[in-house]
Image: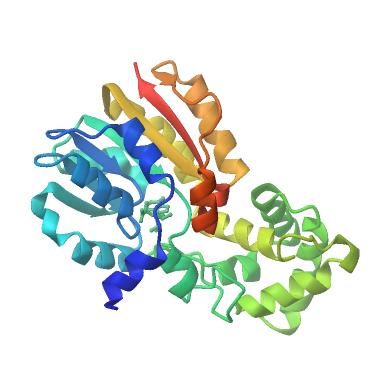
């Protein structure tokens, strides 16, 4: 199989039908995909909005963009790819002379490309450098956070971004061990967390280091700040009746989406409860299991 086929095969876009139903793309419309990734949602929106619909797709990961650019070439100038943080949606669209769009989607988190073949330390299944940047132009890495933050700053990161109950104990272990040897690899960090947390507190369903890895990734990529910004800044860009769809993967994000949608007087919430995957999708794509879609409509 070609590399492109391989990439498309490993990343299955989540809640695809549900997103299409809410966005209802039409020819002539302009849609923003804030998280292009491997382009599955973008491709479907372009197909539905043929012959004249456009997608402006943002991503800050060069590798994801390169793969999608090649794969989505047949759509020609109906697709514009912008390498930028989606929190800069207004600036990115202004550069293209666009001030109103007919729908926005963001599908946050990691693509399978980043998780499975990224070599950036997102997973502790392999031994990789502790980088965790989705945008390699940024300076802060997981290793630099682990080397430079104080014990209480580390504990706060693990507690607030990972909801990790053993945050203080893990932070104290890190600060003690980093004097002997800098923390530079994913396996090294996973092993340290396993030693720091007493056996009786090891979770049954997930690896003991899962929440620490999640917390570091959120901190490195300023994920909650980015989400808060787009949830506010994107609303004035929507035409009346246009929909804003957000797929999130953990409760910190989902809570933020719920509140920002509810508290914005310019929005009408269409999903009282978040939409999750169908039993078939859960079965066929394990990554979909924690996905939650919330949708609001511009008044
Ligand atoms: C889950 S994947 C998207 C998958 C995509 N919907 C598909 O169907 O292939 C998330 C993508 O969003 C990108 N991303 C995450 N946060 C971002 C941000 N703040 N700005 C731009 N891109 C971001 C990641 O680099 C990643 O490629």
Q: Residue at x 53, y 59 (%)?
A: 220
Name which quarter of the figure residue 121 lies in.
bottom right
- The answer, for residue 211, to whether it is visible in the render is yes
Q: Quadrant of the N terminus?
A: bottom left
Considering only vertical position in the picture, is 239 above or below 250?
A: above
Q: Residue at x 53, y 40 (%)?
A: 276
Q: Residue at x 75, y 84 (%)?
A: 180
Q: Residue at x 12, y 33 (%)?
A: 28
Tell which of 48 and 161 is nearer to you.
48
Q: Is residue 126 left or right of residue 57?
A: right
Q: Position of residue 137 (x, y in %)?
A: 37, 65
Q: Position of residue 200 (x, y in %)?
A: 90, 63
Outermost residue to the bottom: 180
Name which quarter of the figure residue 207 lies in.
bottom right
Q: Position of residue 299 (x, y in %)?
A: 34, 15
Name which quarter of the figure residue 296 lies in.
top left
- The answer, for residue 183, to whether it is visible in the render is no
């Amino acid at each position: 199989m070609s590399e492109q086929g391989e990439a498309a095969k490993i990343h299955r876009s989540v809640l695809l039908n549900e997103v299409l139903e809410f966005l209802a793309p039409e020819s002539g419309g302009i849609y923003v995909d804030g998280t292009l990734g491997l382009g599955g949602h973008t491709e479907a929106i372009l197909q539905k909005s043929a012959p004249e619909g456009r997608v402006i797709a943002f991503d800050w990961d060069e590798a994801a963009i390169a793969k999608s650019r090649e794969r989505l070439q047949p759509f020609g100038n109906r697709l514009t790819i912008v390498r930028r943080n989606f929190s800069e949606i207004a600036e990115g669209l202004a550069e293209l002379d666009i001030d109103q769009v007919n729908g926005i989607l963001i599908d946050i988190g990691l693509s399978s490309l980043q998780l499975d073949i990224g070599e950036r330390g997102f997973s502790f299944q392999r031994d990789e450098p502790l980088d965790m940047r989705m945008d390699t132009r940024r300076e802060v890495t997981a290793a630099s956070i682990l080397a430079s933050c104080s014990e209480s700053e580390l504990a706060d990161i693990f507690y607030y971004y990972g909801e990790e109950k053993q945050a203080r104990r893990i932070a104290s272990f890190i600060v003690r061990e980093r004097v002997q040897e800098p923390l530079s690899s994913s396996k090294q960090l996973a092993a340290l967390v396993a030693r720091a947390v007493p056996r009786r507190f090891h979770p049954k369903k997930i690896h003991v280091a899962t929440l620490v890895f999640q917390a570091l990734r959120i901190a490195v990529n300023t994920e909650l700040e980015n989400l808060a910004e787009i949830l506010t800044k994107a609303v004035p860009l929507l035409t009346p009746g246009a929909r804003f769809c957000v797929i999130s993967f953990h409760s910190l994000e989902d809570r933020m989406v719920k509140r920002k949608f509810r508290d914005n007087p310019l929005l009408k919430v269409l999903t009282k409860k978040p939409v999750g995957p169908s039993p078939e999708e859960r079965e066929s794509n394990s990554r979909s299991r924690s996905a939650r879609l919330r949708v609001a409509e511009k008044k």
